[in-house]
Image: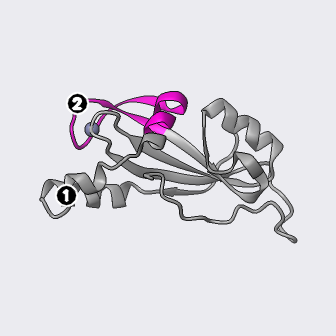
Amino acid sequence: MRTQRQVVDYALQRRALLADVHAGRVAVEEVCDAGPYLLRAARFHGEPTEQACPVCRKERLTLVSWVFGDALRHAAGSARRPDELERLAALHADFSVHVVEVCNSCRWNHLVLSYVMGSGGDPDTGTGRARERRRTVAE
Ligand SMILES: [Zn+2]
């Protein structure tokens, strides 16, 4: 595995949101809103886990890795398998990866991790530096 930089773990936000859901402060429909695009990405590009869905507990969660960054051009904003991430990291200086967990049963989805991958790039010019982009994957 290539070095992952600027790793951000969203476990706290996830736990807080789940606590709100279980307490009834947030509606289940609000958090179980994975769209067909995300569900399809989970099916074809996702990594299965042993972890049960925290909302419905019926299905095991799938992790989907989305890649972002100008350097990726047409590949930006797409879901990639782990081996493809490695290949992209060898080809590009800098791009960010957002890992989203998805339940194919109740459509729960949440960002769990984000990090930067790539061969490095030139810190002086900042070329190839992935710009942080907020983007919903629930569309
Ligand atoms: Zn579920």
* Residue 75 numbered mark, or none: none
Instruction: Residue 16: name its quadrant.
Output: bottom left
The verdict on label 2 being within 8 Å of ligand 1 is yes
Q: Quadrant of ligand 1?
A: top left
Crowding at label 1, few (<14), some or many (≥20) Cα neighbours within 10 Å?
few
The amino acid sitting under disc 2 is: Lys
Q: Is residue 100 magenta?
A: no
Q: Residue at x 24, y 52 (%)?
A: 29
Q: Residue at x 22, y 30 (%)?
A: 58
- Residue 125, percent from left and from top: 87, 70
* Residue 27 numbered mark, or none: 1
Q: First in sequence: mark 1 or mark 2?
A: 1
| Secondary structure at numbered mark 1 | loop
- Residue 139, percent from left and from top: 45, 53
Q: Residue at x 80, y 60 (%)?
A: 128
Q: Is residue 56 magenta?
A: yes
Q: Is residue 92 visible?
A: yes
Return the residue at label 2. Answer: 58
| Secondary structure at numbered mark 2 | loop
Q: Is residue 1 visible?
A: no
- Residue 109, percent from left and from top: 37, 47
The answer to whether residue 125 is above or below residue 7 is below
Of residue 72 and residue 121, the one placed in the foreground of this image is 72
The verdict on label 1 being within 8 Å of ligand 1 is no
Quadrant assignment for the N terminus: top right
Q: Is residue 86 left or right of residue 32?
A: right
Q: How many marks?
A: 2
Q: Which residues are magenta?
A: 39-63
The amino acid sitting under disc 1 is: Ala
Crowding at label 2, few (<14), some or many (≥20) Cα neighbours within 10 Å?
few
